[in-house]
Amino acid sequence: MRWKTGLLLIVIIAIGGGGYFAWQQLKPAGLPPGFASSNGRLEAERTDIATKFAGRIKQVLVNEGDVVKVGQILARMDSADIEAQLLEARAATEEAEQQLDQAVAFLSQRKSELTLAEQEYERSRILGEKGYTTLEKVDQRNAARLAAQATFKSAEAGIKRAKAGIKAAAARVSRLEENLKDYVLTTPVSGRVQYRLAQPGEVVGAGGKIVTILDLSDVYMTIFLPTRDAGKLEIGAQARIVPDAASQYVVPANVSFVASDAQFTPKYVETANEREKLMFKVKLRLPPEVLKKYAKRVKAGITGVGYVRLSPTAKWPENLKVKLPEIQSSTND
């Protein structure tokens, strides 16, 4: 299973030098000093759940809109072929273990033969030195001893081969067992199913996308601010988001990113007037506790206005103080 992340749901306000003029026309009016604002859209990180191996989809267990938790099973691939391979590999491991047992027994027998051959050679050598047997007899015993040594060494090599066979068979079993796990697709993030991209019975290639998850623990609004405002921002600065679809509410946020390079750049930047047209991307991230509490209400793609506090001493105006909808305990909504 391969996890591909980072595709965002942003629609950029404008492109090229016209971005600055669009900002001038669309920005909300009436802000007190120490604040800035811009239009934006809520975004969430997207994770594609894909297959590691080619095959047929057996089950898809979620639908679009479902909320899922980390580790939850999303789909299963048909694993009949790999399960058959795994049975064969386990049988091969058992056979290799039996071969090792046989090799151990063979080695034990060869060791006994070697011990006997060495004893007979030693007796024959002593008798030969005393003249009680012929040199030919001594040579015969020595040849038998050398042959027994060679056979014993061969048996030892057989033990090593048998152990190597077991190791290789066990490695194949382990590999197939790990691969079998990848036939069950789980989610690495909690979130909401955005797309169900495949159906049971379909055959997909390696890397085929099955489900797309929106990570609702990482939701933010991207806005664009001119040089004079972006340059005053600090990471972590307070921010507010007012959704177009629910403008009676004010959602807390924090500045989590300020681009180091301008997104909309005029052709010439030698003059102060032209530099003012540089527009910088800014991300306003929603706090985790808010996302958790309002998980069912959070939707990527919602448009709205993002407000940032340029000075830590500036006080939020009354209409931009945090105001969140009440959660009805009976419905958990």
Image: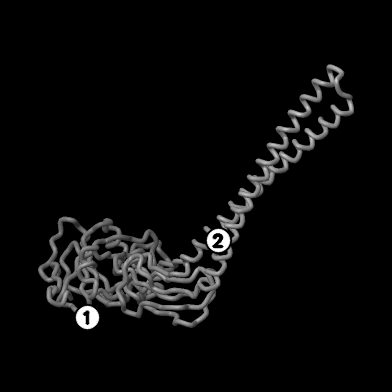
Q: CA distance from mark 2 to mark 1?
A: 60 Å
For image coordinates 50% across by 72% down, the residue present is: 79
- What's the amino acid at mark 1? Ala
| 10 Å crowding of disc 1: few (<14), some (14-19), many (20+) | few
Picture coordinates of residue 133, whole percent (x, y): 86, 23
For image coordinates 58% across by 61% down, the residue present is: 91
The C terminus, quarter of image? bottom left
Report the residue that reaches farthest toward the top. 130
Picture coordinates of residue 325, whole percent (x, y): 14, 74
Q: Which residue is mark 2?
A: 90
Picture coordinates of residue 41, whole percent (x, y): 30, 74
Q: Is residue 269 left or right of residue 163?
A: left
Residue placed most toward the observer, 175 or 263: 175
Q: Which residue is mark 1?
A: 245
Label 2: state its secondary structure. Answer: helix
Residue placed most toward the observer, 333 or 148: 148
Residue 319 visible at all: yes
Label 1: state its secondary structure. Answer: helix
What label does residue 117 carry, if any? none
Q: Does 123 sit above or below residue 185? A: above
For image coordinates 46% across by 78% down, the residue present is: 58
Q: Does 111 sit above or below residue 300? A: above
Residue placed most toward the observer, 154 or 117: 117
- What's the amino acid at mark 2? Arg
